[in-house]
Image (tube, rainbow, N blue to C red):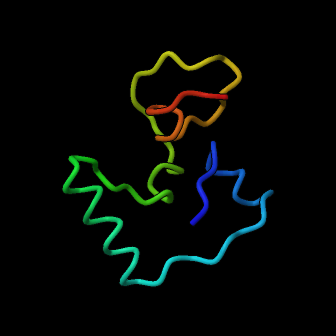
Amino acid sequence: MLTTPEPSSVLRKPRLRELDAADLAKVNRALVDLGYAVVPEELLERDYDGPSRLPWHVQRPSWWHRFFGTF
């Protein structure tokens, strides 16, 4: 599993092998048990049209921007 600082950076870095379904289910269950909400990265890449204090250079804010800001 590979985590990255922003969604688009996955395109620039080599991918490690993905977890198989059983291992992914274990990881998700552990996160939920700890009180975390597991959100697919694809949802974070969707456009966000709500109120925000994002910098002027963010032309199309996403949910990633909403929750994590810009880097």
Residue 17 placement, left or right of 31: right
Q: Quadrant of residue 15?
A: bottom right
Pick the quarter of the image with the C terminus.
top right
Q: Relative to 24, say whether 13 is above or below.
A: above
Q: Relative to 55, say whether 19 is above or below.
A: below
Where is residue 62 drawn, in percent x and y? 53, 40
Residue located 68% across and 71% down the image: 16
Where is residue 4 drawn, in percent x and y? 63, 50
Where is residue 21 drawn, in percent x and y? 40, 83
Pick the quarter of the image with the N terminus.
bottom right
Residue 19 placement, left or right of 4: left
Q: Relative to 61, say whether 9 is above or below.
A: below
Residue located 50% across and 15% down the image: 53
Residue located 66% across and 17% down the image: 56
Residue located 23% across and 56% down the image: 32
Q: Quadrant of residue 5?
A: top right
Where is residue 70 drawn, in percent x and y? 62, 28
Residue 62 placement, left or right of 2: left
Residue 2 placement, left or right of 38: right
Marks counted in the figure total: 0
Q: Relative to 30, say whether 63 is above or below.
A: above
